[in-house]
Image (cartoon, grey):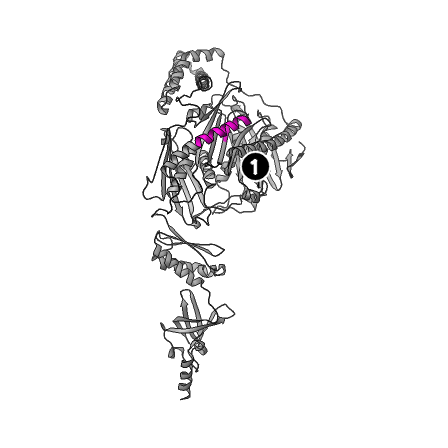
Amino acid sequence: MSKKVFELDFRGRKLVIEQGEYAKQADGAVLVRYGDTVILSTAVVSDNANILSDFFPLMVLYQEKLYSVGKIPGGFIKREGRPTDAATLAARMIDRPMRPMFPEDFRNEVQVVNTVLSVDTDNSPELAAMFGSSLATSISQIPFDGPIAGVKVGRVNGEFIINPTPDELEKSDIDLTVAGTTEAINMVEAGSKEVSEEDMLEALMFGHEAVKELCEFQKTIIKEIGLPKMEYEKLDITDELREEVKNLAADKLDSAMRIKEKLAKYEAIDNVKKEVVSKYEEENSDLDKDELNIFFRIYDENMRETKVKLVLESIEYDIFRSITVNEKTRADGRAMNEIRPLSGEIDILPRTHGSAVFTRGETQALAVTTLGALNEYQALDGISLEAEKHFMLHYNFPQFSVGETGRYGAPGRREIGHGALGERCLKQVMPSEEEFPYTVRVVSEILESNGSSSQATICAGCMSLMAAGVPIKAPVAGIAMGLITSKDEKDYTILTDIQGMEDHLGDMDFKVGGTRKGICSLQMDIKIKGITKQILKEALAQAKEARMKILDMMEGIIAEPRKEVSKYAPKTEIFKINPDKIKDVIGKGGDMITKIILEASHVNSVNDVNAVKVDLADDGTVTIYHMDKDIIDKTREMIENVAREVEIGKIYTGKVVDIHDFGCFVRLWEGCEGLVHVSQLANERVEKPSDVVSVGDEILVKATGYDKKGKLNLSRKEALPKKEVKEEKKETKE
């Protein structure tokens, strides 16, 4: 296959696609060049389908290679390890708009792998990978109803920008990623600084116009080099079987689905399904037990059971939609725009720096805020420009929250994604490091879940921050919106505060977080091919209405951040010193700062839990952290002493700390010593410095300057009072 090159001048930047030279054994492969960002995207499909599976096995990977930014991995092994959170989030972002574009009955395993080869920070590798993933899949034999593409939208000084640079994003009040097809938007991810619903909708539409351009570019490439789509094995379900199962289960499922309480509802639904499946198992019990045919018999039984289960799910799906769209009600009896019962509480954990519980229906989040020193930031070893984080939100979803047993261990994709969404929202109202010099960590523990736990995390996290005394700009709340469309997708219903079943069986999960003033975060995932501007507009308006009600409840519990941090949180002291003195405060090999910490804290190790923490910034800003104000004051005094400037020509009172034949050393203050040469001890000749001074003596000295090595020179002779000088001269003559 000969190499093909395709180029597009996309909004002032060159997008180059190369195909036919690299990864030729993959079903689809393209090299995407966007500026100096280079991504290899490949797509591979398995030959066989597991038609008895109830899900489509799609895996999207985003592999960060540190050589792409000229870095050698840290650690002992010196190679890339498990994906960073950023890589996991990038893979999720690509997966979400692609997944709805595969056929519903397709069960062949598909792997889409994006390898980051080179990164130009002005040109997003994540968006290049999304483009490459769509194109590699589209030109292959894999059935895929694409293409899809994504862009980032920023707004600087009121002007929208497509794919803003990091510098532009710093000035932008919107950081929006929008993906979709030429027809509609199907994925949204955003953080914004309290932006209005109208402005956000405009940004979405602006981004979609750019998405269309990228999709049309892909279509020209697909038309030239795209392969015919493969035939694939499907699970054939007859109309006869569908009718049989419907007669057995429909009425019972309808009753079960109207039960309001989650666990009781799910138990009733499961019992109906088990009852129906068991009837078909009984029918199969009389089948031939011939050992030669046992494999085929079991396979046929499993296939029949799978078909029955799929039909039951289809019936459940149709009943749910009928209740919502036709009856204009919900399975739990709520109105379309009704929020589940709300409650909250703060200060439930006495020794933490801030804690809060937020409950919405059967979803409950416990959020805990911890304050630490600025130097306790999270170091990031990845390909992004960001090297450290001073605000973190971590989300934990234990299996007991849904009444199940399961895996416990490192956070999975879902937990990382939900944590990132909550963090993105709350970050918009966090104070600057100058305003609040702490590293802040919020941990959300989901105690109970029936949908929208990520938005409960935002609400609980906000209240815990305020309880901890973090001066956030405004309270923030989050709400999840849903969408139910008719079979022909002409009629639709928007749902406020979706619960688990509405998320599972619905068409959209649209999460909106914000303040009373505007939106701080968006995330949208859909199961249909796309949604219209009108649906987005209505969903945003309905979400705003709900957000105000939730904020009313939250502000009834805690209206504003506390003025003081918890007595168990470290207190701070901030002051400035001459930046040139930072090296002196640190000392050789850190000896001076270590000495200050140990002496001020009265501890034997800087790692002692009671040791004072000191953060030294390059601009001379010093931040001290400790729970004891006396220790903070002592630390400040010692640092200021080291950093004090000696005024040449000024007379000081100092203490003799060491005596040598060539003179004595005098300490003006802690961290500042100078040499009084033997010739400068007195007006007369001094043979031995010890004849004039002793260790511990307090004497007057004059600062006379610095030697070539930067050492301070002092003079006792020039500091002696004139009367004393005359008397000394007289005594010398006698």
Q: Position of residue 307 (x, y in %)?
A: 46, 17
Q: Nearer the viewer, residue 43 or 450?
A: 450
Q: From what the image shows, is residue 517 above or below residue 71?
A: above
Residue on which the image places disc 1: 152
Q: Mostly what secondary structure, the magenta segment?
A: helix
Q: Nearer the viewer, residue 384 or 579?
A: 579
CA neighbours of label 1 inside 10 A, class few (<14), some (14 to 19), many (20+): many
Q: Position of residue 189 (x, y in %)?
A: 51, 34
Q: Residue at x 37, y 39 (%)?
A: 558
Q: Quadrant of the C terminus?
A: bottom left
Label total for image: 1
Mark 1: which secondary structure?
strand
Left or right: 116, with 563 as reference point: right
Left or right: 218, with 719 as reference point: right
Q: Quadrant of the N terminus?
A: top right
Asked whether 546 falls inside the magenta stretch, the response is yes
Q: Position of residue 725 (x, y in %)?
A: 42, 81
Left or right: 690, with 481 as reference point: left
Q: Position of residue 145 (x, y in %)?
A: 58, 25
The span shown in magenta is 524-547
Q: Nearer the viewer, residue 365 or 236?
A: 365
What amino acid is at disc 1?
A: Lys
Asked whether 300 falls inside the magenta stretch, the response is no
Q: Residue at x 40, y 79 (%)?
A: 688
Q: From what the image shows, is residue 640 above or below residue 132?
A: below
Can residue 397 be seen by looking at this rendering? no
Left or right: 171, with 599 as reference point: right
Q: Nearer the viewer, residue 59 or 477?
A: 477
